[in-house]
Image (cartoon, rainbow, N blue to C red):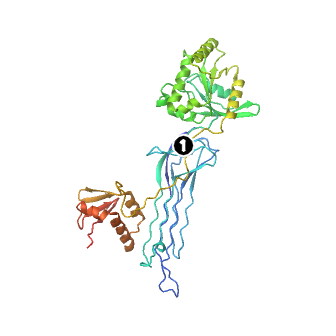
Amino acid sequence: MFVDKAKIYVKGGDGGNGVVAFRREKYVPEGGPAGGDGGRGGHVIFRVDEGLRTLMDFRYQRHFKATRGEHGRNKGQYGANAEHMIVRVPPGTTVLDEATQEVLADLVRHGQEAIIARGGKGGRGNMKFATPSNSAPEIAENGEEGEERWVILELKLLADVGLVGFPSVGKSSLLSVVSAAKPKIAEYHFTTLSPNLGVVDAGEGQSFVMADLPGLIEGASSGAGLGHEFLRHVERTRVILHVIDMAGTEGREPFEDFLKINDELKLYNARLLECPQLVVANKMDVEGADEQLEIFRSKCAEQGWEYPIFPISTVTKQGIKELLLTAADILDRLPQTPEVETLDEEEERIIYRIRNGRKEGESLFEIHKEDDVFVIVSPMIEKLMKRTNFRTEQSIMRFAHAMRKIGIDQALREHGARDGDAVRIAQFEFEFVEHQ
């Protein structure tokens, strides 16, 4: 079964926790802090494997979670970083964030990698918090949580040549004649429901991969018929063979079919019309095809178009060799892979630090009231909470100091908070205490 779309959940590993520990050695009665840092959690990394052809594996496994880093240990020992989780995907896979529809990665080359969910940083042990005024801190951080998200995987075939056209114009028949592929062929529309690939030997030592793609109809660019399920695969092809039933065996007008298909390609992605396009006038063995071909040529000339036209018949094999050699020659002059938008695998991270206040208009937190509870919304404070170990008094005092430094205490007073009022941050509730 050919599967070209999947939805999966990925999560980077959490960072290991830092530890509070002190030297406990003979003849060292007042040893200093010796708690090590936690290790970094593993990334979820997608890697291209040219041996894969579909997204079938993701039908059976939809959750991918990297392991967390090891916790820090005493004697100043750091926890080990976790191994990254490698997820293999076929060439031509595009990864989108389901929530934002942002393209996270466009993976086309064998061995290409992209980090899809980063692992969390390890928490610092109490060795890192020693100061001249506090030489024996009982402060350690929890590890940072790894990134998590639902992503959409879309496979766009990396075929050299793509066959496009209305249903039943002979695309599958052409592929079966020029390659060893055995696509389903029958006298009804949409016989081909998923792409078929075949390796074509054009002769003279030239070969390429050809894709027989499901037939188009009007409105495909808006999703009608097989719509986007078809058009996504055309994006990757380097040469388009536009197959037309030149005999009009179903009462269709060949030139009108040609215009409609190109309109759909343009509406979906205007870049597709920039690809080299060869017109394949099929079914030339049928009566009336020669007259229709002359009409087609004259209408193209009226428009000033100079598309190469190849009269062929998949029954008699007329004109097929010339068509294949021309396609192979064009491919030799084109880049090996289609132009795609590449994304930096390691984007620079911007870190904002608080320096004596904040910029005008910059919001570090929001406060509102729900019933009798003051609710604080602040991603920065929520992140700090997750990294704070509330089991030690010094860690609690450090967290409270950070709240005061940012200005939350004063903001709560301005909103009417009094001693003993409830304050909620994320899922945690605290009691507001006025300091004398």
For residue 295, side relative to residue 421 (left or right): right
Q: Examine the image and state in which quarter residue 258 appears.
A: top right
User: Which image quarter is the N terminus in?
Assistant: top right
Q: Is residue 277 above or below residue 148?
A: above
Question: Looking at the image, which residue is at 46% across and 50% down?
Answer: 149
Which quarter of the image is occupied by the C terminus?
Answer: bottom left
Q: Label 1 amino acid?
A: Thr
Q: How many marks?
A: 1
Q: Position of residue 102 (x, y in %)?
A: 47, 45
Q: Residue furthest right?
A: 204
Give coordinates of residue 414: x percent, y percent: 24, 61
The percent coordinates of residue 277 (x first, y second) are 61, 27
Q: Report the side of 4 relative to 391 (left or right).
A: right
Element carrying mark 1? strand
Q: Relative to residue 341, is residue 415 drawn left or right?
A: left
Query: Does 66 appear above or below 32?
Result: above
- Among the 4 quarters of the image, the one containing residue 417: bottom left
Toward the bottom, the furthest residue is 27
Circle 1 residue? 94
Q: Nearer the viewer, residue 191 or 78?
A: 78
Depth order, front residue of 379/6: 379
Vertical order, 96 against 416 (above or below)? above
Residue at position x 55%, y 42% from top? Answer: 341
Residue 179 visible: no
Residue 164, percent from left and from top: 58, 27
> Can residue 24 be seen by looking at this rendering?
yes
Q: Residue at x 68, y 34 (%)?
A: 333
Q: Is residue 372 left or right of residue 267?
A: left
- Badge 1: few (under 14), some or many (20 or more) residues near its Cα, within 10 Å? many
Q: Is residue 240 above or below residue 5?
A: above
Q: Residue at x 64, y 18 (%)?
A: 283
